Image (cartoon, rainbow, N blue to C red):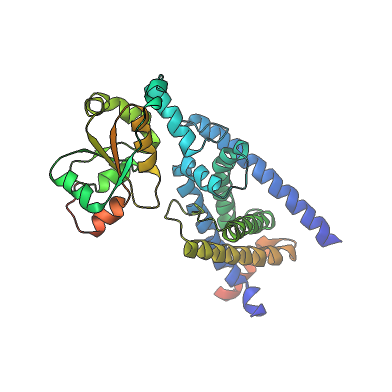
Amino acid sequence: MKKVLSNRWFILVLRPILGAVFIYAGIVKTQSPQSFADNIAGFQLLPNEVINLLALSLPVFEIIVGVMLIIGLQLRIVSMSVLILSIVFALALGSALTRGLNVDCGCFGDGKPTVFKMWMSLGRDVLLGIAALIIWRLYSFISNPRPVESEALGDASGV
Amino acid sequence: MKNVTKFGKDMIGVWLLATASICVALLINQLRDHPLPLVYASKTQRMETAVSKVAPVVAPVLATMDHPQIISLEEFRDLVENKKAIVLDARPEIFHRLGHVPGAISLPREDFENVYAKYKGLLESYRDQAIAVYCSGSNCEDSDMVANGLVKLGCHRVLVFKGGWDQWSGAKLPQEGQ
């Protein structure tokens, strides 16, 4: 298992998938920042002064992070960002679940809030966090990620 | 020790990325047709603002205000089929275009003040008659908010079909739209 997770090909596949997920999530949210702000307000965690700022900035942050993941820019910082986002999302969802709130996370646009969907979102956040942690760990232990990727591609093509 | 330093650098990077995102987001917001205000207002607060913009003096109406009544699918169906009421769709306009109850007029909660102005004459002529409002289903608040807004604007017989579009379409009743 450890071998698979540290496999360079696995990371090369994981990165664009994770990036695409974040770009999609960001684009969906930018379509209707007011709806996303309503979703954030539903969690009853933040003051009104912060909600709209978060509803506007978070989608942009997700899109930037997604693009950087795909093109392979500053991967340690980007994967750390994804990890922090996933932890924050998971904590917010966990807190809403424990308080018995039925909220739509607004992660991928609007939807009817159900407890099942909230658990699904929580599970997805955990998976995203694990994926980010795998990438961060790999790129933390190599000084220059670029040649490693080239090496991986080179190995596979028999160069 | 080296990893701790790396971790610190990464955190600074995350902070810079977040700051850049905030700056870009605020810039994009200013370029929008309707920029989002910096301080959040709840749906109810936004609805109250919309109502006050439509009719700045509502205080006398509030004193004698009727409350919206909840109606069942059968009652709503009777109103629609026999054209006994004006039917309003409180869902976002895009959903109305995709499919709606026959004869329903789109009056989205989110764009209440602008769309109300468009149908002001019609709605004011129905002040003493039945006005039925629906949205997507039992979980949505839009029909309640629009109904309360109409009551504040002086409509006396506002009815809310709580089952909404979900119950109507689920019962395979006639639809209009794309």
How many numbered marks have been drawn onto this rendered protein structure?
A: 0
Placement of B72 over or under A121, stated as above or below? above
Residue A148 in which image quadrant? bottom right
Query: What residue do we see at 58% from left, 58% from top?
Result: A93
Residue A125 in which image quadrant? bottom right
Query: What residue do we see at 41% from left, 28% from top?
Result: B50
User: Which image quarter holds the N terminus of chain B?
Assistant: bottom right
The spot of residue B100 in percent (x, y) is 24, 47
The spot of residue A101 in percent (x, y) is 54, 55
The spot of residue B3 in percent (x, y) is 81, 61
Placement of A130 over or under B139, stated as above or below? below
Q: Can residue A24 be seen? A: yes
The spot of residue A145 in percent (x, y) is 68, 62
Is residue B6 toward the left or the right of residue A51 in the image?
right
Query: What residue do we see at 58% from left, 56% from top?
Result: A96
Placement of B164 over or under B62, stated as above or below? below
Query: What residue do we see at 77% from left, 52% from top?
Result: B9
Residue toward you, B148 or A69? B148
Is residue A6 toward the left or the right of residue B175 in the image?
right
In this view, the residue farthest toward the right is B1
In this view, the residue farthest toward the top is B57
Is residue A62 toward the left or the right of residue B163 in the image?
right
In this view, the residue farthest toward the front is B64
Residue toward you, A21 or A146? A21
Q: Can residue B178 be seen? A: no
